[in-house]
Image (cartoon, rainbow, N blue to C red):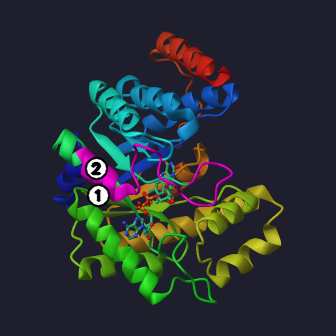
Amino acid sequence: MKVIEKIREASKEEHKVLFSFEFFPPRTHDGVDKLFEQLDHMSIHSPAYWDITWRDSAAKLSLEMANVMQNLFSIETMMHLTCTKMPIEEIDHALDTIKSQGIHNVLALRGDPPLGQDKFVKTEGGFECALDLVTHIRNKYGDYFGITIAGYPEAHPDVPRKDDGLPTLEGYQNDLAYLKKKVDAGGDLIITQLFFDTDIFLKFVNDCRQIGITCPIVPGILPINDYRGFLKMTSLCKTKIPTEITAALKPIKDNDEAVRGYGIHLVTEMCKKILAHGIKTLHFYTVNKEKPTLSILMNLGLISEIKISRPLTEKREDFVRISSELKKMLRR
Ligand code: FAD
């Protein structure tokens, strides 16, 4: 089923809240085992869908993980797909593969420049930007896929900034106008970049509505796992950090447990505010860690218990076989 259909269906129920989890393909053998355990633990809480990110150097892994997530765990899966180093034949191969696995959801992205390059350069025979990819998917695959696109409450990091770090008005407006083109080309759902100023997100939603973007806009929520990771992600995405968050984090920055605890409290409050504004789907960037996301969901009353000790019992043979295949892929 398409995620957009699930969201539309849920919107008919007044108090229904949906949540989803994002994971990235593991980089190590240990990461494979941990991810399988996390998927097992988190699947118990019945996310509306979950998704697997795309790494141009690990395409096969994303395809295989998408298959596992959709068909072994039976949870609606969305696969991210980028244009980085992807000629059209490879893009179609990826889309045909997930289609044959019964996956109906793709997050269509341009992608970042490959490691070591500053600027995104179109691959020969590939696409320039997400707009081209969305157009291609709609032209070639019709309505088969639900197509999600990325939206940037603080504009894409490449958009020119003022001294305060926020995008210029012109840059922000151009970014929004481009987002509308992605929707008009066939994007039916927007997931946003992470943010820590909820007002910026709410303004973004309002600004999108003003220019005629009507599709659901799902906030991308990053639970804070540790101070270094938080700084890395927010500087990469050029995210504004409200002064009170910096002030609260600095004195505890070397105490991971305290940082996580504060992050859980902070993000819970952010989510409460978002939900109070009528936005009823939350998308969690789990960074392959289960506890902070599940704690936030518990605080929000959206799940009742953190069940983290269940061993991988169901379908154990399948898990063992597939995880050893994934590990072989990592070896190559
Ligand atoms: P685009 O939408 O094509 O463009 C990005 C920006 O460039 C636009 O916002 C706009 O400002 C400008 N732009 C581009 N083309 C035009 C145009 N024709 N006219 C005007 N302006 C234009 N990266 C990964 O490698 N793997 C992932 O799995 C992944 N998942 C992500 C998930 C989400 C929800 C988000 C928000 C980001 C994700 N990223 C991922 C990061 C993403 O690849 C980068 O942010 C990348 O730099 C831009 O991708 P995009 O699809 O937003 O690009």
Q: Position of residue 271 (x, y in %)?
A: 45, 67
Tell me the residue that label 2 is attached to: 147
Quarter containing the N terminus: top left
Q: Main secondary structure of the magenta part?
A: loop
- In percent of the image, x 22 and y 59: which residue is there? 185
Tell me the residue that label 1 is attached to: 189
Relative horizontal placement of residue 282, taking residue 157 as reference (left or right): left
Tell me which amino acid carries mark 1: Leu
Q: Residues within 10 Å of mark 2 (few under 14, many from 20)?
A: many
Q: Is residue 304 visible?
A: no
Question: Which quadrant of the figure shows ligand 1?
Answer: bottom left
- Magenta-colored span: 113-137
| 208 shown above or below 50 | below
Q: Position of residue 326 (x, y in %)?
A: 56, 21
Observer-nearest of 265 and 57: 57
Q: CA distance from mark 1 to mark 2?
A: 7 Å
Mark 1 residue element: strand
Q: Is residue 142 visible?
A: yes
Observer-nearest of 185 and 54: 185
Mark 2 residue element: strand
Mark positioned earlier in the residue sequence (1 or 2): 2
Tell me which amino acid carries mark 2: Ile
| 91 shown above or below 329 | below
Q: Position of residue 180 (x, y in %)?
A: 28, 70
**Magenta run includes residue 136:** yes
Does the residue at mark 1 contact the one at mark 2 (Cβ under 8 Å)? yes
| 148 shown above or below 26 | below
- In percent of the image, x 70 and y 57: which residue is there? 229
